[in-house]
Image: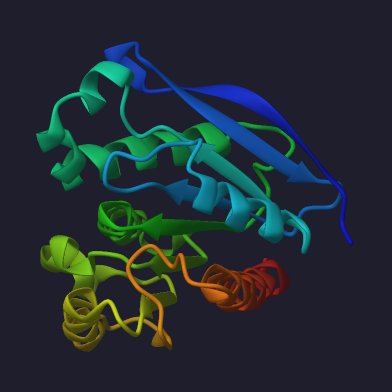
Amino acid sequence: MTTSSSRSVTTDVGITSLGLAGILGTPQEPIGVVLFAHGSGSGRLSPRNNYVANRLQRVGLATLLFDLLTDREAGDRSNVFDIELLAERLTVATAWAREQDAIKHLPLGYFGASTGAAAALVAAARARDDIAAVVSRGGRPDLAEPLLNEVLAPTLLIVGGDDTGVLELNQKALATLRCEKRLDIVPGATHLFEEPGALDAVVDLAREWFTAHMGDRARRS
């Protein structure tokens, strides 16, 4: 098992002079770094995403969990669905990660949940081939529809089998994506993957996707 350390960080969000609080977890010998894009008003303290991040660190993936919105912004519900704003913040956090000595040389991926998955896909589309892989957990890729066909990063969509409305949206998005892509369904799981073993299934799928594609990126570099 790979040991890791975590520290609180503040990512610079450029001309707005705001600070986005985050948690950077770095294994001893990281093979890649995964930025988390939370959804539906969640943030760096999300129990589900922290659980996923801790599990990813065990296989050598550094993780950055951070708040896409300030506390004040999060109080306005409309910001949760402002995909352009969320994608912009993710892009700035990506630039911040590229300046950190411990991780700047690593292949980079996005893990998005709910509306955060749409932000991850928009940011990945604009980053072109700079992103090694994207994983969406119970995501809303339909909210990124104008840019879906521009995503180059290999993209894995994970949806609960009982999350029927979101499953249909992901099936439609899968048809639009032109990159390497896959849709995996976790049987019996609902939107938050709260059922026994459901979140572990997400972790296993995400871990496989990230390590495979980040390994490919590292071998090509």
**Left or right of residue 100: residue 196:** left
Q: Quadrant of the N terminus?
A: bottom right
Residue 144 picture location, percent across and down: 18, 62
User: Residue at position x 34%, y 55% from top?
Assistant: 120
Q: Quadrant of the C terminus?
A: bottom right
Q: How is the image coloured?
A: rainbow
- Name, please, the residue furthest toward the front: 196
The residue closer to the viewer here, 132 or 185, is 185
Please tell me in which quadrant of the rendered image residue 174 appears: bottom left
Look at the image and tell me whether residue 181 can be seen: no
User: Residue at position x 63%, y 68% from top?
Assistant: 214
- Name, please, the residue furthest toward the top: 17
Q: Is residue 157 above or below residue 80?
A: below
Look at the image and tell me whether residue 165 can be seen: yes
Residue 43 picture location, percent across and down: 41, 37
Please tell me in which quadrant of the rendered image residue 138 appears: bottom left
**Left or right of residue 199: residue 181:** left
**Left or right of residue 9: residue 75:** left
Q: Is residue 4 above or below residue 181?
A: above
Q: Is residue 167 above or below residue 58?
A: below
* Total numbered badges shown on the rendered structure: 0
Residue 52 picture location, percent across and down: 59, 57
The residue closer to the viewer here, 12 or 159, is 159
Residue 149 picture location, percent across and down: 20, 75
User: Residue at position x 60%, y 33% from top?
Assistant: 23
User: Residue at position x 68%, y 48% from top?
Assistant: 105
